[in-house]
Image (cartoon, helix red, strand yellow):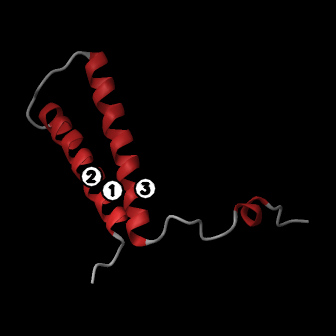
Amino acid sequence: MPFADEAAAQAYREAWEAWNKQLAQLHHVFLDGERPRPDQLKGLLNREARAKEKYDEARLRLLGLDEPAFPVEDVMENPFR
């Protein structure tokens, strides 16, 4: 029996693959010596960061942790009243 529902598992797999694709491109630059133009490097870093965010979100959904632990109202309330 799978740990998570199929939709969450599929979203996780897709996010993992997309992030790894971006990481491979970063490795070409930082580990293999590829020299992109500055604007290309900025784009590469932005794409990797966005892919990592999507992966993190999909991972939390897969683990069932996508809901905040505390309601936002409780976190925003002033504890010194």
Q: Where 1 sits versus 81, above or below?
A: below
Residue 39 image offset from top left, x and y in percent: 31, 17
Q: Residue furthest left?
A: 32
Image quarter of residue 61? bottom left
Which residue is denoted by mark 2 in the rendering? 14
Instruction: Quote the CA–CA distance across marks 3 and 2.
Output: 12 Å
Tell me the quarter of the picture where residue 32 sits: top left
Q: Which mark is residue 11?
A: 1
Number of other residues with Cα within 10 Å of mark 3, as a class: few under 14, some 14 to 19, many 20 or more? some
Task: Report the Cα–Cα distance between label 2 and label 1.
Answer: 5 Å
Mark 2 neighbour density, 10 Å: few (under 14) some (14–19) many (20 or more): some
| Residue that carries the numbered disc 3 in the rendered image | 57
Residue 11 in the image, given as x and y percentages of width and height = 33, 56
Q: Tell me the kind of residue under disc 3.
A: Glu
Residue at disc 1, secondary structure: helix
Q: Residue furthest right?
A: 81
Instruction: Report the mark closest to the observer, 1 or 3.
Output: 1
- The answer to whether marks 2 and 1 mark residues whose Cβ atoms lie closer than 8 Å is yes
